[in-house]
Image (spheres, helix red, strand yellow):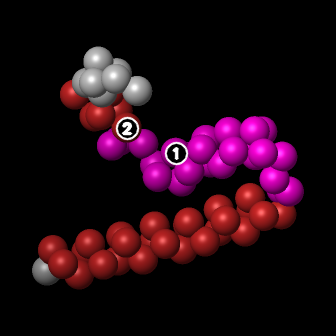
Amino acid sequence: MTTENITSPRLGKLSDMNPIMIYDGIMEMIFQEEGKSSERVVKQRSMFVMLSEICKKVGKLLKK
């Protein structure tokens, strides 16, 4: 990826996206390339969901 690809409008769009949607896209690419079992992908996704929820809660606590 070049700096040309990383422009402010693109970063703005990325920051508006749900982290879980981004993760799903990444995991789908990995799944297609490495042939991981779907069970493992689901397990990793659920771990990511828990982690993102924890990050949201910590962020709210830090803002107080």
Which of 37/46 is in front? 37
| Circles 2, 1 touching at the beta carbon (< 8 Å) | yes
Queried whether the magenta region covers residue 37, the answer comes back as: yes
Q: Is residue 21 above or below residue 48?
A: above
User: Which residue type carries mark 1?
Assistant: Ile
Whether residue 11 is situated above or below residue 63 in the rendered picture: above
- Picture residue at 67% right of the left edge, 65% below the top: 44
What secondary structure is found at the residue carrying circle 2? helix
Q: CA distance from mark 2 to mark 1?
A: 8 Å
Q: Residue at x 30, y 78 (%)?
A: 58
Where on the picture, by quarter, is residue 63?
A: bottom left
Rendered residue at 75%/39% (across/down): 33
Magenta-colored segment: predominant secondary structure: helix
On the picture, is 16 further left or further right than 59?
right
User: Where residue 52 sits in the image (x, y, percent)?
Assistant: 46, 67
Residue 61, quarter of picture? bottom left
Residue 22, given in percent of the width and then of the height, sits at 52, 45
**Residue 47 is one of the magenta-drawn residues:** no
Range of residues picked out in magenta: 15-38
Report x, y in % for residue 6.
Answer: 30, 27
- Left or right for 5, reference 64: right
What numbered label is drawn on residue 22? 1
Q: Relative to the observer, which residue lies in front, 61 or 34?
A: 34
Circle count: 2
As drawn, the label of residue 32 is none
Do we see residue 8 in this rendering? yes
Q: Which mark is residue 14?
A: 2
Q: Residue at x 81, y 53 (%)?
A: 36
| Quarter that holds the N terminus | top left
